[in-house]
């Protein structure tokens, strides 16, 4: 208003419109408008200067009167009926104009149709326009507020995270409570959302939490390997939102606010006694939310999803995604690699002996890669110090390229003693594939250098008497010094007397 007063004052002082425009830094059209209104009021500068800013605004900045046209009401009815179609692939505003013109030949022209459509969109449905195509994106986030669960036995109150996912076009929403935002929990929630929707979109838009994005970057963010593998499994691209740019995922931010109102506030005051019970309550409220009509519209999120987005989602694989971990190992001379977490050995083709490989493992499967090529795949077995061997991986007698083979270990044992040779032969024979026993044989023979050949010979004799043919039997005998005592004497040791031992007469 100070600019306006300045314009009127300079005009009354006799300055030209061009001079006033240069002095006040206003456009000439604005100066002309103020002067035109002032001339029409038939008043003086003094009277204008005494008016408060509010009255000046009413005098000089009146909004144009709304256009009254009998064709507007039919146009608004038509747009309200057809607004959903604009989100469908191939439907443009020009196509709607053609249909409108065919239905109302005396209606607005194309240019006026576009003009009134934009006015109607801003005034009646300010959030209607979406740049989201059906089946294109799924936005995911976690709420700031948490929910609580009380343990029925201990009474301990635990805090739970709440995950929210929403489809861009239909705004169908998924909500789930989860223990944490760790990668396994976050991926599990994303997968549950995809399963709930019945299909996978083309892309998933997460926030910059560590479970999805290890290092945020405007141009090339570094993704979490497991999250990226999950997205690849379902055929989705990962498009992280920019850091500190909530508008990149405005839909899910809005869904979080609605979740507070329709789910958080509607949960019973009595705390759930388990996470499963809490999610059952959330799911019931979620169904009501998705089936409630949008404000000012006669259809719901579920109806909109069924009509325009369900068919555009990608089909889901039969099996769920399994989170995989990785480790690096060297292929041993027996053609196996060790999965250190289980201490279990898995075979690879004998040609990769001494090569460094990457082991990827999930709950049920172990995969072994060499230079990005999968060279072996096994079912995961969690028994420690055992072998899983594919016969096709093992070398035949004429294919042995490594230094280790049965003859090598038998000759090494023969140099110590015939008892050791016999024992090593039994260790080799107890395994389905001799290669599985190479590590045990190497360990047994190494005791010859550590404790001496004589103690190793006696240890092998004692283990043979017990019928035990493995490395741990020899190790236990030597550690306990059992090889230093006579085997026959140990067998004839008298029963020690003790008040808790009843004796043979008790059972007569």
Image (cartoon, helix red, strand yellow):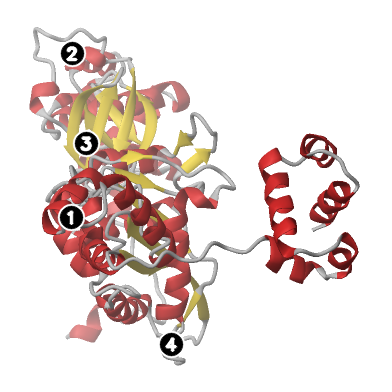
- Local packing at callout 4 (Cα closer than 10 Å; few below 14, some 14-19, many 20+) is few
Residue 465 position, x and y percent, is 21, 42
Q: Residue furthest front?
A: 42
User: Which of 180/44 is in front?
Assistant: 44
Residue 336 position, x and y percent, is 25, 26
Q: Is residue 195 above or below residue 477?
A: below
- Local packing at callout 3 (Cα closer than 10 Å; few below 14, some 14-19, many 20+) is many
Q: Secondary structure beneath disc 2?
A: helix
**Residue on which disc 2 sits:** 407
Q: Are marks 4 and 3 in contact (CB under 8 Å)?
A: no
Residue drawn at (40%, 27%), measured in percent from left and top? 447
Residue drawn at (54%, 37%), measured in percent from left and top? 215
Q: Earlier in the sequence, mark 2 or mark 1?
A: 1
Q: Which mark is residue 387?
A: 3
Q: Earlier in the sequence, mark 4 or mark 3?
A: 4
How far apart, in angstroms, are the residues tagged by discs 1 and 3?
A: 74 Å
Q: Quadrant of residue 457?
A: top left
**Residue on which disc 1 sits:** 100
How far apart, in angstroms, are the residues tagged by discs 2 and 1?
A: 90 Å
Q: Secondary structure beneath disc 4?
A: loop
Q: Which mark is residue 153?
A: 4
Question: In the image, which is nearer the foreground, mark 3 or mark 2?
Answer: 3
How far apart, in angstroms, are the residues tagged by discs 4 and 3?
A: 42 Å
């Amino acid at each position: 208003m100070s600019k306006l007063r300045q314009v009127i004052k300079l005009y009354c002082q006799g300055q030209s419109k061009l001079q006033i425009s240069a002095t006040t830094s206003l456009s000439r059209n604005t100066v002309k408008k103020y002067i035109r209104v002032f001339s029409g009021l038939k008043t003086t500068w003094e009277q204008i200067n005494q008016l408060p800013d509010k009255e000046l605004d009413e005098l000089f900045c009146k909004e144009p009167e709304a256009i009254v046209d009998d064709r507007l009401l039919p146009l608004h009815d038509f747009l309200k009926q057809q607004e959903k179609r604009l989100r469908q692939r191939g439907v443009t505003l020009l196509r709607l104009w053609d249909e409108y013109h065919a239905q109302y030949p005396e209606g607005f022209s194309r240019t006026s149709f576009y003009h009134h459509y934009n006015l109607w969109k801003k005034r009646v449905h300010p959030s209607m326009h979406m740049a989201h195509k059906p089946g294109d994106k799924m936005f995911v986030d976690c709420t700031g507020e948490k929910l609580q669960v009380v343990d029925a036995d201990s009474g301990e109150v635990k805090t739970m995270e709440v995950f929210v996912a929403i489809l861009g076009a239909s705004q169908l929403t998924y909500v789930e409570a989860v223990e944490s935002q760790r990668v396994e929990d976050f991926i599990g929630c994303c997968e549950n959302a995809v399963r709930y929707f019945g299909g996978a979109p083309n892309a998933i838009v997460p926030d910059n939490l560590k479970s999805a994005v290890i290092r945020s970057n405007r141009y090339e963010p570094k993704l979490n390997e497991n999250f990226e593998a999950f997205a690849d499994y379902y055929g989705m691209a990962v498009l992280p939102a920019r850091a500190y740019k909530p508008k990149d995922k405005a839909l899910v931010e809005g869904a979080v606010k609605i979740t507070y109102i329709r789910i958080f506030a509607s949960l019973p005051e009595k705390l759930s006694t388990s996470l499963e019970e809490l999610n059952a309550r959330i799911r019931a409220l979620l169904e009501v939310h998705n089936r409630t009509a949008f404000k000012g519209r006669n259809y719901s999120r579920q109806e909109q999803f069924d009509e325009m987005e369900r068919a555009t989602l990608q089909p889901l694989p039969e099996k769920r995604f399994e989170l995989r971990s990785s480790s690096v190992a060297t292929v041993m001379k027996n053609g196996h690699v060790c999965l250190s977490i289980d201490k279990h050995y898995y075979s690879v083709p004998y040609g990769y002996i001494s090569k460094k490989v990457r082991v990827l493992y999930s709950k049920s499967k172990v995969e072994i890669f060499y230079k990005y090529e999968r060279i072996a795949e096994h079912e995961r077995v969690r028994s420690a110090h055992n072998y899983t061997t594919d016969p096709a991986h093992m070398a035949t007698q004429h294919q042995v390229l490594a230094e280790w083979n049965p003859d090598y270990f038998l000759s090494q044992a023969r140099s110590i003693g015939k008892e050791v040779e016999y024992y090593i032969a039994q260790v080799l024979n107890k395994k389905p594939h001799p290669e599985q026993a190479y590590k045990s044989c190497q360990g047994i023979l190494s005791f010859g250098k550590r404790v001496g050949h004589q103690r190793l010979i006696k240890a092998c004799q004692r283990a043979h008497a017990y019928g035990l043919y493995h490395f741990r039997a020899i190790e236990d005998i030597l550690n306990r010094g059992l090889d230093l005592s006579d085997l026959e004497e140990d067998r004839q040791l008298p029963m020690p007397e003790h008040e808790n031992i009843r004796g043979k007469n008790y059972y007569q």
